[in-house]
Amino acid sequence: MSVRIQTSQNVELEYEPASLGDRILATIIDRLIYLGWAIAWFGLFSLLKLGENQSIFFIVLTIVLPVLLYPLLAEYFLNGQTLGKRAMNIRVVRLDGNKPTLSAYLLRWLMIIVDTGIFTPLVAIIAIAANGKGQRIGDIAAGTSVIKTIKRVKLSQVVYQQLPEDYKVTYPQASQLNDRDIETIRQVLRKRNEELSIQTAEKVSNVLNIENTNQPRTFLLTIVNDYTHLAAQENS
């Protein structure tokens, strides 16, 4: 089972959806964080010996609100991950290939009430198991899914070659791309689809303003190697 995401370059990528077990464990980790946070604050309150009205106010301010807002704020600022999701190597993504917006995260957050609040987590579990795209009700409403960030890739699928120390860069413009662009190109190369390779090569040559005289696959492989070499030099 996989999740297909259509990128802005009209390239269809496949990702493995987060398993139900991964999502449950991520939730448990997050709730342990809630518990630790609450215990720490209750310990501080006992030391301060606050009055009843003060205690209620500070409990709402320092415990209830942070716990309620944590899933929304963590996913928005940590690129689709809570600390639990990060520990389990899973992430929220949009199915249209774009970065999830605040409104998408907000919709997922609001729908937690339906997924886990009113009918217990049973609704979310049934939706994820039956949907086929790793989506709970909130994900369906927001057009998102939760995927594994670590892909299972067969050795035969890997498009990579060890570059020699004296490797010469053919297209220095490759440095204008980013890791996501290169991953898209690698997935195109893995597919070994000639038409898709031609379209991708044309797109890359237009974006980088390069006149390509090579075969599309050769051109794309060179772009990947040039980017890898330039990135390694930059980080060294």
Image (cartoon, helix red, strand yellow):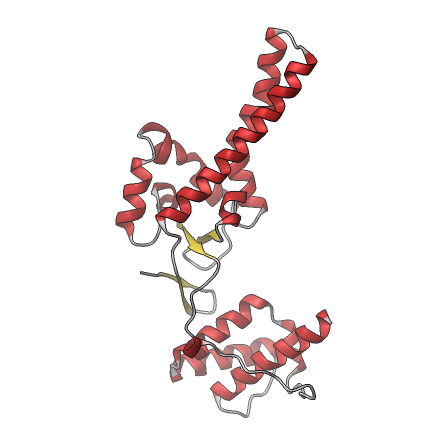
| Residue 186 can be seen, yes or no | yes
Identify whether 93 is placed above or below 187.
above
| Residue 157 percent location from the top left of the image | 42, 76
| Residue 25 percent location from the top left of the image | 43, 43
Quadrant of the frame with the N terminus: bottom left
Q: Nearer the viewer, residue 196 or 186?
A: 186
| Residue 89 percent location from the top left of the image | 49, 53
| Residue 87 percent location from the top left of the image | 52, 48
Is 219 positioned to the left or the right of 233 in the image?
Answer: left
Quarter occupied by residue 27: top left
Q: Residue at x 54, y 77 (%)?
A: 204
Quarter occupied by residue 120: top left
Identify whether 177 is placed above or below 60.
below
Q: Nearer the viewer, residue 130 or 139?
A: 130
Is 68 positioned to the left or the right of 235 in the image?
Answer: left
Q: How many marks?
A: 0
Q: Nearer the viewer, residue 158 or 12?
A: 158
Identify whether 128 is placed above or below 226.
above
Is 50 positioned to the left or the right of 129 in the image?
Answer: right
Quadrant of the frame with the C terminus: bottom right
Q: Residue at x 51, y 88 (%)?
A: 218
Q: Residue at x 67, y 10 (%)?
A: 49
Q: Residue at x 35, y 36 (%)?
A: 115
| Residue 80 can be seen, yes or no | no
